[in-house]
Amino acid sequence: MTLTDQAAEYAAEFNGAPAAVQGLMKRAFMFGALSALTSKAPREQMLAECVQFGRAIGTAAESAQA
């Protein structure tokens, strides 16, 4: 699966949303992926941030920051 395929799959999760919203979600996904690829942060730090983000999804903390 390519990065483009994954971005399209991510945007599809917003099915029913206007095309502009789906486009923005795809751009956000690609921005995050490119930022991770070009980051000078150590690999362990990047993985820790991803895990923390994954744990926050759907929690009250995520809703409070939105």
Image (tube, rainbow, N blue to C red):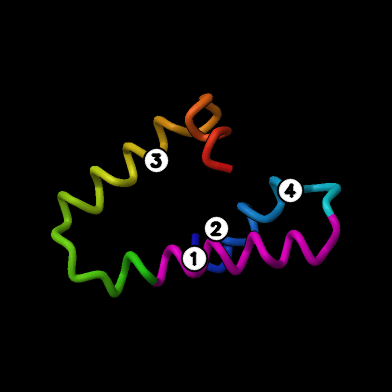
What is the span of residues highlighted in magenta in the rendered image?
18-34
Per the image, label 3 sits on a secondary structure element best described as: helix
Q: Which residue is mark 4?
A: 14
Q: Is residue 53 left or right of residue 39?
A: right
Q: Quadrant of the C terminus?
A: top right
Q: Which residue is mark 3?
A: 53
Mark closest to the chain's N terminus, 1 or 3: 1
Indicate yes or no whether the magenta region holds residue 39. Answer: no
Q: Is residue 54 left or right of residue 40?
A: right
Three-letter amino acid code of the residue under disc 1: Thr
Mark closest to the chain's N terminus, 4 or 2: 2
Q: Which residue is mark 1?
A: 2
Instruction: For the residues labelled 1 and 4, say whether their Cβ atoms are less than 8 Å apart.
Output: no
Q: Which residue is mark 2?
A: 6
**How many residues crowd around disc 1 within 10 Å: few (fewer than 14), some, or many (20 or more)?**
few
Three-letter amino acid code of the residue under disc 4: Phe
Label 3 – label 4 distance at C-alpha: 19 Å
Three-letter amino acid code of the residue under disc 3: Phe
